Image: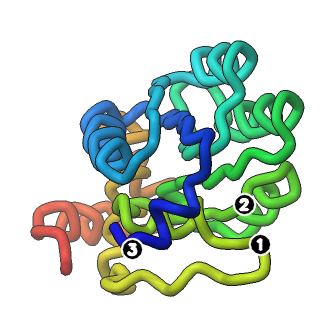
Amino acid sequence: MNERQLNDIGPDNSLLLVDDDEPFVKRLARAMEKRGFAVETAETVAAGRAMAEVRPPAYAVIDLRLEDGNGLDVVETIRERRPDSRVVVLTGYGAIATAVAAVKIGATDYLSKPADANDVTAALLASDDEMPPPPENPMSADRVRWEHIQRVYELCDRNVSETARRLNMHRRTLQRILAKRSPR
């Protein structure tokens, strides 16, 4: 982390991370603590909203889709309690409509998963008039497609036939894709 980023955090360095992917949120929490943030984590919309009500954070990183609902509900709670908070929404679904909804509700930025701590820090600390730099190593189109297929497959409880139906794809084609390793 450079000296500019340390100075940009400010006196209130509270950061709320809300994500139901436990290994991811633990890694990100450790990385953000090393960057000077005071991190609190939650794994559900309910827990995130409760924390935001009691101690509205200066910064927040919130997953869009959580097991018990929509992460945008947490963004709204933070905005009500602390309008100056900088909020980044993370999602495995990089759709324009959800990005627009997140920004309208008050998110500062919108990042597709997997985002690393450098991307998150840059998005949190970017000034309003500057765009954060593009990612150093963006995912390839093949990787984005593979990630989307894996996510839908998991949401369908690993049911190949249901996943193929939802993706409008032949079942055997899906089986071949699932049998391969993830692209780089």
Q: Quadrant of residue 174?
A: bottom left
| Eye-nearest disc, 1 or 3 | 1
Q: Quadrant of the C terminus?
A: bottom left
Q: Residue beneath label 1, please?
A: 128
> SS at mark 3?
helix
Query: Which numbered disc covers residue 144?
Result: 3
* Mark 1 or 2, nearer chain start: 2
Q: Earlier in the sequence, mark 1 or mark 3?
A: 1
Q: Residue 140: percent from the left, percent from the top? A: 33, 85
Q: What amino acid type is highlighted by mark number 3? A: Val
**Label 2 is placed on what type of residue?**
Thr
Residue placed under numbered mark 2 in the picture: 108
Instruction: Give coordinates of residue 91: x percent, y percent.
Output: 53, 54
Which residue is depicted at the point 64% across and 67% down?
A: 95
Measuring from the top left, give residue 55's x and y in whole percent. Answer: 67, 20
Q: CA distance from mark 2 to mark 3?
A: 23 Å
Q: Are marks 1 and 3 in contact (CB under 8 Å)?
A: no
Name which of mark 2 and mark 3 comes first in the sequence. 2
For mark 3, does the 10 Å Cα neighbourhood hold few (<14), some (14 to 19), or many (20 or more) residues? many
